[in-house]
Image (spheres, coloured by chain):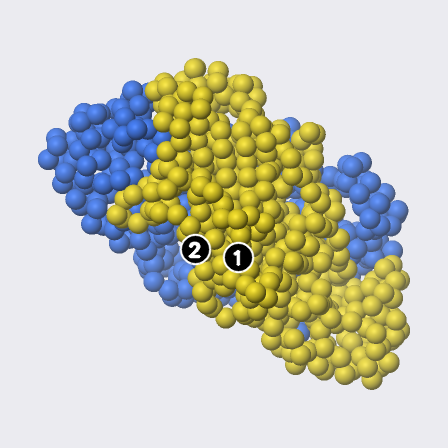
Chain colours: A blue, B yellow
Amino acid sequence: MDTADLGLPVTVPSTALFTDQYELTMLQAALKAGTAGRHSVFEVFTRRLPNGRRYGVVAGTGRVLDAVENFRFDEGVLRFLREKAVVDEETLDWLAGYRFSGDIWGYPEGEVYFPGSPVMRVEGSFAECVLLETVILSILNHDSAIAAAASRMSSAAGGRPLIEMGARRTHELAAVAASRAAYIGGFSSTSDLAAGFRYNIPTVGTSAHAFTLLHDTERDAFRAQVDSLGAGTTLLVDTYDVTEAVRAAVEVAGPELGAVRIDSGDLLLVAHRVRQQLDELGARDTKIVVTSDLDEYAIASLAAAPVDAYGVGTQLVTGSGHPTASMVYKLVARAESAEPGAPLTAVAKKSTGGKASVGGRKWAARRLDAYGVAEAEVIGTGEVPPELAERQLLVPLVRGGEVVAREPLDVVRDRHAAARAGLPLSATQLSRGEPVLPTEYAYGPSGS
Amino acid sequence: MDTADLGLPVTVPSTALFTDQYELTMLQAALKAGTAGRHSVFEVFTRRLPNGRRYGVVAGTGRVLDAVENFRFDEGVLRFLREKAVVDEETLDWLAGYRFSGDIWGYPEGEVYFPGSPVMRVEGSFAECVLLETVILSILNHDSAIAAAASRMSSAAGGRPLIEMGARRTHELAAVAASRAAYIGGFSSTSDLAAGFRYNIPTVGTSAHAFTLLHDTERDAFRAQVDSLGAGTTLLVDTYDVTEAVRAAVEVAGPELGAVRIDSGDLLLVAHRVRQQLDELGARDTKIVVTSDLDEYAIASLAAAPVDAYGVGTQLVTGSGHPTASMVYKLVARAESAEPGAPLTAVAKKSTGGKASVGGRKWAARRLDAYGVAEAEVIGTGEVPPELAERQLLVPLVRGGEVVAREPLDVVRDRHAAARAGLPLSATQLSRGEPVLPTEYAYGPSGS
């Protein structure tokens, strides 16, 4: 593939350095010990949802597939590793030929997940799988955290459109991924041109306070904007006095004025006043957009207000209090030797100090109740019970190193909406609570 | 400059799309209205520090300079903007020739800041300055948030080294910037190879639980690691039973064992036990590294424990509860016309709804008390009082479009240590409190 498709406006020649050093030193030691070729199963899961959240949202899968496909150690990368003596020459030789040749399964992007859900499973030699830990977790932890916040906000907004405008509050490239994740979670558009360019997400935006301040009067600014962008534009009305601004806005643009934006103050109160004023001025179709430090709670509190769209920045790109998911990438099974076909053994950290995990190559299925509503996340090893066979969650993403599951972002967005709609109604309560589905295990702790 | 220097392993052909759409629509309207050429002064500042924090840390300046230098609208970007009808042809023509030709002043990177500090000032035509809002804020808001958390952690750690290992908890490129910001804030090294590659930050890492689980026994794993990486390596001792693991580790590596790492459990208790056991086994020089969900409070609580180094992940890259700074980019003064030399007028949002700001092109200085300790952040317009002339904080970063202030990261890191050391002692208290310096204004609210 053309690496220019990876993350424009940024070209990523290789994703192989999005890696923690220990992955390479483990590789070196395993190569020397003869254990690097043991067939291994790594699993991505989380032990818990963020405090009080009812469900998680898988996001970033498409970006993971891009990253795996481009995970190559080119000459510049190898030179760096040699100069810094990160690993020895034998390991560098091995890395020079690296190309992931294994299999990846996962929850399809946009699906919901719960504690213990095996959201991704990476299978191949220990050597080829261990290297992917950091890049896979970076992408899934970031994007899933944003998508989960976006999903709550889109529930809270009902059918009203949500605009993602958080680019200025996060790393400039994290912002592009955040727009993508927000779109999956139900947002309609973004202010971020890079996200429009890269992912074809609709972009929006008209003016800031600076534009009003640039002009001699607010009325001059409105006239300049309407002259250039048309009466259908959105005028920002809170630079000086909102009431005067709304009057000037309708005088300048006429009742065809597209929208007014309110970016400060008591939004509930101001929205009601502005709606009344717009109606009195005959601008009954002029919409009201609000954009000041919104989160899902503020959005919910405006449900009865005459608001037509929400712009969300900081709280979206910071995951509304939970800027990262806590997914981990753990070895859950490996072959007893490096021989082809050697039997697999389930493995798991067993320390009494915490962070214990469950070994074994897992399947997962979502059990429905008699009304077709999800009632449990069932996770197991071995054979899938026949009654759950049709409800399995893991799908093939990469087979023998080839990506087999690329899909348009709108498919992912629709999938998320459907998955959320299939959960019990309490899923979309904003109040803190337990995960809306219990996780059930269909095997003993040492099963494989 | 070679764009390959910008963010390797990622090449950024242009930073011009790290832009919110409204910057381009404002440009279009201002071009048409004849106001785009008005000389303008934009200021980056924050109205408040994160709740309870005593000081902020300026970070990202070097990345801002790279971004400004590469802010160009190439053919691919222009084609996108044309296809999506973001702006009209006249504006596209203007963008095709864009190159920032103004001046940028700022607090030097690594300096501390307070509410109201004009951490950066961008000056030129409205048109050329308004476009830089998003990319400048993205970088400063992200990097400064991480550096502030890093600075608190490094205070808490005393002289003990801190390892940045949060790549897996944040966007893969945000991680690289986070390593850089952590280094500025006082961290010693990173697990992130991309950060080593791009910024020459020392990289570290040896092994994860997966390496132990790959092998038939823990002892086999330790032997494999020591065989390959030498006795000076760090062995991870909490996969099964810590006491047994420490015994095996010293048996395999001998008393020359470099370090053991503990990644779970009650670190205070376990560190004491492991230290005692290591000493009894004769491994008196073997160090102890701890790495489980640490933040500045956990680090401080381990001050009396026999710990030699801390590895910090999640809480570092998420700003320890504050993943973004709240810096804004506001027009504070602009010329009365587009004529060269037209007089400047201070401007500011005046809405009663909140978010009001102070207009005017500002200077800033840090006043010292009789003992040479900082006692106030003084901000003003007009002439700098003679007694503060030597204590001014803003330095030139870009003159006439040319970057004039590139500097090595170690200089920035040392500057931060010195700036923090110049604050009152209460600056490094971890408890919540007011900013350690008051902000004093040396002008009336309408001064320019």
Residue where numbered disc 1 is placed? B367
Q: Residue furthest left?
A: A280
As drawn, the residue found furthest toward the front would be B386
Circle 1 marks a residue in which chain? B
Per the image, the residue denoted by label 2 is B440
Asked if the residues shown at circle 2 and circle 1 are in contact, with their CB atoms under 8 angstroms apart, the answer is yes
Mark 1 lies on a secondary structure that is strand
Image mark 2: chain: B
Query: What residue type is disc 1 on?
Result: Arg
Locate residue A244, reporting x and y percent.
19, 37
Of the 4 image quadrants, the one containing the N terminus of chain B is top right
Corner quadrant of residue B371: bottom right
In-front residue for pair A294/A400: A294
Residue B286, x across and y down, in percent: 81, 73
**Which quarter of the image is occupied by the C terminus of chain B?**
top left
Residue displayed at 87% across by 59% down: B228
Query: Is residue B212 shown above or below B58?
Result: below
Q: Is residue B81 above or below residue B236?
A: above
Distance of label 2 from label 1 (alpha carbons):
10 Å
| Position of residue A278 measured from the top left corner of the image (x, y, whole percent) | 16, 35
Query: In which quarter of the view is residue A355 placed?
Result: bottom right
- Closest to the observer: A409 or A341? A409
Residue name at image x 69 percent, y 54 percent:
B414
